[in-house]
Structure formats: C-alpha cells, structure tokens
Image (tube, rainbow, N blue to C red):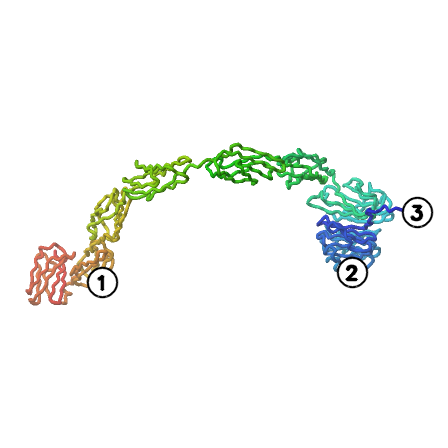
C-alpha cells in the first residue's frame, strides 16, 4: 500500500549485537557475551541470564573455575563474580587514565589470579582485580588490543588502533614494534600469540582493503602479510587452535563470517550454515580428552552467538543401521548391521533394554517382550553422529504350551497328589480339572483323591500370547491301601534262654498274622510270646493280610540271645616278699572264659590262664586281669596287690696300703654289695668322706679303726675294721715305755725286752693290714720266731694298759 502499513517480520530472529565473548574451559555449558544496548548476558546451566546492564563490552570466564567470571560496561568499568553472578564486585578502582569504548582485558594464561587491562597504559593485578599496578608509561591514545603469550607470561603485547607495543620482561621495558604494519591505511583490531612461541604474533587489521592479517615470527621485528584468501573487508579478530600440533590452524573473524587458514595455505571460508554477518570475536572451548568435542564460538554483530566443531580433514560420519529381524517372540535375537557412511572408528549401541555394545555389527538378545528404541553413536576423526530408531524392535510374548506332572500318579486312598505346572512361555492363569469333580486355579496345586478309581486330569493355561489345554487320560490311579506290617519285641537282647513278648504295630485293616521267629518257631497270634533257648542272632518276620492285600516285614538279626558275661577274679601267692619275688597267679573267673590278659603292673603281661611271674624290682604293683568269652569280657584290678622289697646292702671295703710311715696316703675301695645310694666313711682320725672310693692321708702314727656305712632302698649297714690302719713309730721315738728289740732288721728270732713283767698284748700286722700274730704275755721278755713270716716290713703293737707302743720291724 505504498508504505502506509508495515508488517513486523523479525519475530523469533536472533539479532543480538555482540562486541565480545568469553567461554569456560571447565564446562561446555557456560558462555558470556557483551551486547550493544542489551548489557552482559551469561549462559548458566543452558539458560541465558542478564548479569550486567547497559552496554556489554569485553567479558571472560576463569579458565580454572567457571564460577569466577568477568564482565564490563563501556570505558573500562569491570565487574567480577566468584559465585556465578549471584553477586558481583566492580574491580576498576585504582586504575587511572582513559579507556576505550570496548576496553581490552584478559587473564594470565599461566596464573588464573593475575589480570591485565589496557587503558592508556597496561595495568596488572595479581589478586583478581583487588589491587592494580601500572606496568607501562607511554600514555596517549587508549589501547584497543591486549594479549599475553601462553608459553611465557613475561611476553605481553598491547596496541592502540595505530601502534603496537611489546615487552619480554613482564612490562619492565616496552618496545614499539609497529614496524612495517600498514597503519596509514588500516587499523589494528586484535592481537594473538602462538601457543608455544612467544615471538610468533598475529595481528588483524580493520579497513576495507586487502590488509587483513599480518604475522611476525621474531617478536615484531619484521612483519609478513598473510591475508591471501581473505575478502577486502575489515578483519576483527584472529586466533589459533592450539590442539593442532602438526599445522598452524588460524581462524579469522571478518565482516562476512569466519575464515580458516591451515599452515601455509590461503584462507578459506569456514562459515557453512552461518549468515553473512559481522563477526566481532572468536573463542575456543578445548576438550583435551576428546578433541573432537572441542568447539569454536563466534560472536556476531546482529545475529547472536554461533558455534561449530573445529576444522577436521575428515567429514563427520552419518550414523545408520538396520536390524534383522525387527519383530518376533521373546527371547528374540536381532543381528544389527552398521550402515554408517564416512570414516568411523568407534561404535556405541544402546539396544533400549540396558544392553549396549561397542562392536560394529553386534547381535543382541531381547529376553523380555516389549518395544525397544535402538541408538547408534558413531565416532570418527571428523566427529560423531547419533541415530535413534524409536520402537524399532518389537519382542512379543509367545503362545504358551501347557504341560504338567503329578506326584505320585498312583497310590492308596486317600491319595494326595502334588501337581506341578511345566508349561512354557508366559502364563497368567491356570485352570485344573482333577477328574473327580474338583478344580483349582492355583499354579501348582495339591489334590486329595478320596475314592479309588482312574482319573483324567486337564490343565488349561492362558497368557498374553494366547491359551493352551492339555488332557492326560486316566493319569491318576487311586487304590485301596494294603496293610503295612510292623511290630516290636521286648526285650530284644538278653542272656539265653530269652523270653520275648512281640506286639503287632501294623496299620490298616489286618485279618491274619503269621510270625516266623527265626529259630523254626512260628505263631498266628496277633501278639505272641516266644522263648529263645539257644544263644544267637535271630531275624523275625511278620506277614499281615487284609482286604487291601498283604505285607511282610523282616527285621534282620532283631533278637540277640547271648552268652552271659564272665566275671573276672584271681589271687596271687605270695603277695609280699623281697626281690626277686616269684608270684603264682590263679584265675578264679566264673562263666565261660576263653582268653586271659594279665597286666602285672611293672610292664609285664601274660596270656596264660594261671601264670607264674617274677618281680625283679622293689615296689608296690597293681595287678589286672581281663577275661573274654562268648558272652563278652570283664576285668578286675587289684590295687597295690603285690609288694616287693629289697635287702639292705652289705658294707665291705679294703684300703691300700694299711700300714706305713706317716704321712700315709691310703686309697679305699668300696666292695659293698646290693643297691646303694650313699656312702659314709669314718677314717678313725676324725677324718670322713661321702665318696664311694675315697683316698685319705694319715699324718701321725697310730692304730686306726675304719668304718664304712652304706645306705640304699633296702636299708643301712656298717662295716668296721678295727685297728685297720697301722702307722708305727721307730723305737727311738717310743716314749710310752722303754722296750728293747733285737735284732732289727731280723732274720730268725726277734728278742723283745720289757722293763718289767706285766700283762702286755702283742699284735703284729703286715703292711697290707693282715694280722700275723696276736697274744698276751706276762713276762719281761719275749722271743718271736720271725722265720714263719715272709720278708717285709711289719708293725709290732704293744699295749700296756693305756700305753701303746708301735714298732717297725724289718724281716730280712
């Protein structure tokens, strides 16, 4: 109508005018953008929210924590949130000078707490904007571009529209590196630094000419035009994909879309499905685990925010498949065939019943009936694709097949039969007809047949797949019961003759009884008594008969008539005496005995009936006798029955020598007999010893009696040898009385002259202690015939009352 009326056609069109954007690196869900006239918007958990009003400018998300984000208004009014925009704080305080309409600021790529912002100079903060420090001093025009090298934070590049500065020492000194850049015809719009080389820089230029992107590989000392392939339009941003390690992969944001440059190749369009619109900034979300999940995002000035997979030399595969069969009764096995196109490396199948597979062409069994959606995700170097076929597989219920069994199928009335459903496939209902007028709807019923007869049983089943009926003709046979024979006898064991009372315990009706007692005896009484005369084991049989038939019960070896047990008894003669003691044992056992085992208490045994046994050692001994016979066994123990003693030892000894001059060392030898534990010697000069064979030294002359006392288990005895040791003194040494002997040494006769005639006892011993003579004289002189003695030394002892003279006589 010539413009009189207009129709609004923009409803639903995305027309946001975005200056800048920031993307999270810890999640794909968070994006933030600054919009002309529409403030700053953030996508938080897939929902766009307004977080700052006014005109939205530069914005970013902390690459280490998506909860910390930054947004700004015009001329450098920057806000920070640490809680996903629940609250925010202005952090521009402390920064002096002017700032551009879109003020550049960024996060240190190596320290998330450090920020850089460009006003007229570059400022930095190490505490997320809490405080700021200026690190340049040139002033002048406001900065429009700012970046920090990812591989070395000391390399910082900042630019106005016409000048670019660089520092390699964190801002301590700066250098104008504008060099040969075409500043007269173009403006600097963006700076990027290669991810692994702080001296490789890319600068985008913004004018309607061919000066679009320039590169320096020496920190800005020289510049190279790499614009080939870009349209002669403003280029607003240039960034690198750091995940491509084989080629330098660059993306440029132009006034007509996004362009891609690979290595030394020219730029090519990278804006399929995008409108021709001004792209103001690019940013990349990196998935370093699955790089095909990485995304490039583009902020446009008028058509909102766009995203795409990064460049891949491979096309994205297209998922496709089929399955055979797609319908059938469960369990249904389906063979799946992958029909995907383009390069595929991995397959992930979801069969819709929790089953999965990573095979290219899997088979899967659907156990349960139902409709199942099948999903295939294919992944290749070009990316991933998913195909879902909804309700693709239908597994149906099969028609059920009736079957059953009953246990037992024959027996006496009342007969209880347990029926078991053996039907296959899904069954919901059961109907039983037992053939005697009764029915049931239980799956596995039990039924009592009260009356005898043959009965046909029918089972009808129904399920989601249909119904089925099974008839088993004359399946159950119920009969009258035959009696069951049973009995008991009391007692069942005992000594012969043994009288047993039998009691009939048979069940069901019985008319007649026939007993066989196993010893040729029988009875037809119901409850007979029977005597077993002879010992033995007897099997008893009862046959009962009634209207239902007969039954026989045999109890094998049920009755045992045994021999009486013997009773052990004995005596021994004698029961006391000295060792060795011979004892005669006499068996006094009663009842039948055919074996004897004697234990005499000292380790000795015997199997004779009445043995004779000798005890060699002293002690008190228990004696036991165990007797055995056909009636069993018995034993008797007589405690401390035999007492055996030992004789006391007999003391005896010799000493060598028994005479000699003092000091005289005598070796004594024990000649005692019997069992001896201790020895006690008395040498007659107050000396003693407890050794068995001691030696003793006599120091003075004299006549010494020696005694030995020995003690053992049998007692103690003592042997005394009077005047056993003789140590003479020379005549000149005799002070007892004046006695003259002549000659000495002597060959024939020895003359002894006393001072007077008195009673004197003369005793002569040889050096072995043997007495050669002993008599009493009353004269004053005595003549001894020495010819009767062998040559040697003798001791002559003369006793005159208490005076004792011991004289050494030498016989030649």
Mark in the foreground, 2 or 1: 2
Residues tagged 2 and 1 counted as in contact (Cβ below 8 A): no
Mark toward the start of the polypeptide (3 vs 2): 3
Q: What element carries label 1?
A: loop
Return the x and y of residue 514 as percentages of the image width and height: 35, 36
Q: Quadrant of the C terminus?
A: bottom left
Q: In this figure, which residue is indicated by the disc labeled 1?
A: 687
Toward the top, the furthest residue is: 473
Mark in the foreground, 1 or 3: 3
Return the x and y of residue 766 as percentages of the image width and height: 14, 57
**Residue at 11% across / 67% down in the picture?**
801
In-front residue for pair 525/405: 525
Q: In this figure, which residue is indicated by the disc labeled 2?
A: 93
Decide: few, some or many residues near mark 2? Use Cα within 10 Å; few <14, some 14-19, many ≥20: few
Mark toward the start of the polypeptide (2 vs 1): 2
Q: Is residue 481 left or right of residue 460?
A: left
Decide: few, some or many residues near mark 3? Use Cα within 10 Å; few <14, some 14-19, many ≥20: few
Mark in the foreground, 3 or 2: 3
Q: In this figure, which residue is indicated by the disc labeled 3?
A: 4
In-front residue for pair 531/783: 531
Q: Real-space Cα distance between discs 3 and 2? A: 53 Å
- Reply above or below: 615 against 352: below
């Amino acid at each position: 109508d010539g413009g009189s009326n207009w129709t609004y056609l923009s409803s639903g069109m995305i027309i946001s005018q975005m200056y800048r954007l920031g993307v999270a690196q810890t999640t794909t869900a968070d994006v933030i953008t600054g919009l002309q006239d529409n403030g700053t918007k953030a996508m938080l958990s897939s929902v766009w929210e307004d977080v700052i009003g006014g005109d939205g400018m530069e914005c970013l998300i902390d690459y280490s924590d998506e909860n910390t984000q930054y947004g700004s208004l015009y001329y450098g009014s920057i806000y920070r949130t640490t809680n996903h925009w629940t609250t925010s704080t202005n952090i521009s305080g402390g920064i002096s000078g002017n700032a551009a309409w879109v003020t550049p600021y960024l996060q240190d790529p190596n320290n998330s707490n450090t920020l850089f912002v460009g006003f007229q100079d570059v400022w930095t903060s190490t505490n997320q904007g809490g405080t700021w420090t200026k690190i340049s001093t040139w002033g002048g025009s406001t900065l429009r571009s700012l970046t920090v090298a990812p591989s070395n934070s000391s390399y910082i590049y900042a630019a106005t529209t016409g000048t670019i500065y660089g520092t390699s020492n964190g801002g301590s000194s700066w250098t104008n590196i504008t060099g040969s850049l075409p500043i007269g015809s173009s403006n600097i719009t963006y700076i990027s630094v290669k991810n692994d080389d702080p001296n490789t820089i890319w600068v985008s230029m913004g004018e309607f000419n061919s000066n679009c992107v320039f590169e320096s590989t020496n920190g800005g000392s020289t510049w190279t035009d790499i614009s080939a392939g870009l349209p002669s339009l403003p280029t607003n941003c240039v960034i690198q994909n750091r995940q491509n390690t084989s080629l330098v992969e660059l993306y440029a944001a132009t006034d007509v879309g996004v362009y891609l440059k690979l290595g030394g190749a020219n730029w090519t369009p990278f804006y399929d499905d995008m409108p021709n619109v001004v792209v103001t900034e690019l940013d990349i979300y990196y998935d370093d685990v699955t790089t095909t999940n990485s995304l490039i995002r583009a902020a446009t000035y008028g058509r909102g925010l766009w995203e795409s997979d990064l460049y891949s030399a491979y096309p994205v595969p297209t998922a496709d498949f089929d399955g055979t069969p797609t319908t059938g009764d469960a369990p249904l096995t389906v063979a799946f065939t992958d029909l995907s196109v383009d390069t595929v490396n991995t397959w992930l199948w979801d069969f819709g019943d929790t089953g999965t597979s990573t095979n290219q062409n899997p088979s899967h069994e659907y156990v349960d009936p139902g409709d199942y959606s099948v999903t295939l995700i294919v992944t290749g170097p070009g990316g991933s694709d998913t195909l879902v076929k909804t309700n693709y597989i239908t597994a149906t219920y099969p028609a059920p097949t009736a079957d059953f069994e009953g246990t037992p199928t024959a027996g006496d009335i009342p007969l209880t039969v347990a029926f078991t459903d053996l039907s296959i496939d899904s069954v919901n209902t059961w109907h039983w007809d037992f053939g005697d007028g009764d029915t049931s709807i239980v799956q596995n019923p039990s039924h009592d047949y009260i009356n005898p007869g043959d009965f046909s049983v029918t089972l009808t089943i129904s399920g989601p797949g249909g119904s089925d009926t099974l008839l088993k003709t004359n399946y159950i046979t119920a009969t009258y019961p035959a009696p069951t024979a049973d009995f008991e006898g009391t007692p069942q064991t005992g000594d012969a003759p043994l009288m047993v009372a039998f009691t009939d315990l048979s069940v069901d009706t019985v008319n007649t009884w026939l007993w066989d007692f196993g010893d040729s005896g029988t009875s037809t009484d119901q409850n007979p008594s029977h005597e077993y005369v002879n010992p033995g084991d007897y099997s008893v049989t009862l046959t009962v008969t009634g209207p239902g038939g007969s039954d026989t019960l045999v109890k094998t070896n049920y009755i045992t008539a045994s021999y009486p047990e013997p009773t052990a008894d004995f005596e021994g003669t004698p029961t006391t005496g000295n060792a060795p003691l011979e004892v005669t044992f006499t068996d006094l056992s009663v009842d039948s005995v055919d074996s004897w085992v004697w234990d005499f208490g000292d380790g000795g045994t015997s199997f004779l009936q009445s043995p004779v046994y000798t005890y060699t050692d002293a002690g008190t001994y228990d004696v036991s006798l165990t007797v055995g016979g056909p009636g069993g066994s018995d034993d008797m123990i007589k405690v401390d029955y035999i007492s055996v003693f030992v004789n006391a030892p007999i003391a005896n000894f010799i000493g060598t020598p028994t005479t000699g001059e003092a000091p005289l060392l005598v070796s004594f030898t024990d000649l005692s007999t019997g069992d001896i534990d201790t020895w006690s010697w008395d040498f007659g000069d107050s000396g003693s010893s407890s050794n068995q064979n001691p030696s003793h030294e006599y120091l003075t002359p004299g006549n010494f009696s020696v005694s030995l006392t020995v003690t053992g288990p049998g007692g103690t005895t003592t042997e005394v040898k009077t005047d056993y040791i003789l140590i003479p003194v020379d005549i000149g040494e005799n002070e007892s009385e004046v006695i003259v002997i002549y000659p000495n040494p002597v060959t024939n006769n020895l003359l002894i002259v006393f001072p007077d005639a008195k009673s004197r006892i003369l005793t002569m011993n040889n050096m072995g202690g043997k007495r050669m003579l002993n008599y009493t004289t009353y004269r004053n002189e005595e003549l001894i015939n020495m010819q009767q003695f062998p040559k040697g030394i003798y001791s002559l002892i003369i006793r005159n009352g208490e005076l004792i003279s011991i004289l050494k006589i030498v016989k030649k």
